[in-house]
Amino acid sequence: MTDTTKQKRPQQKLGWLVLFTTIPTLFCCALPIAFVTLGFGASWAALYASVPVIGIVAANKIWFFAASALMLAAAFWLAFRPGQSCPVDPDLARHCNTAKVWNRRFLYLSALIWLVGFGAAYLSVPLLEWLDP
């Protein structure tokens, strides 16, 4: 195993972990609002009834949001920390740069999913109450 392979493994694992911890925030908070808004409330109710883990995630959403926010922060630090370098070999450098671009895209996607879930879980009700007193 080369040094570059050893360096990429923790970053790769953290990237997947970040992506999969932001998805439960989407299921607990953003998707229900989207389904109801689009007129698929009955479909969401049936899914909620048949997949009980969604209720568990919704009941413990503060822990999911806190854990995923910490992992997102760690992933952003890993993606943008100073002192990163790619190998000198042109082929490896090209693959390294391509991987960096895709890692950052997935990181931005994870952050967007987290923000949508956070907005749906914690900002939508206060905003509606403020708009319609």
Image (cartoon, rainbow, N blue to C red):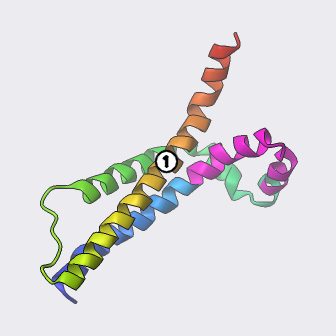
Against 62, residue 75 (above or below) is below
Question: Which residue reaches farthest bottom?
Answer: 1
Q: How many marks?
A: 1
Which SS does the magenta portion mostly show? helix
Whether residue 9 sits left or right of residue 84 in the image: it is right
Q: Where is residue 91 in the image (x, y as percent from the top left)?
A: 23, 84
Of 35 and 25, which appears nearest the observer?
A: 35
Q: Going 34% across and 64% down the picture, which residue do you hit?
A: 101
Against 92, residue 17 (above or below) is above
Q: Going 29% across and 78% down the picture, which residue do you hit?
A: 95
Badge 1 is on which residue?
112
The answer to which quarter of the image holds residue 89 is bottom left
Q: Position of residue 78 (x, y in %)?
A: 26, 59
Whether residue 83 sits left or right of residue 130 in the image: it is left
Q: Is residue 122 magenta?
A: no
Of 118 and 99, which appears nearest the observer?
A: 99
Against 70, residue 91 (above or below) is below
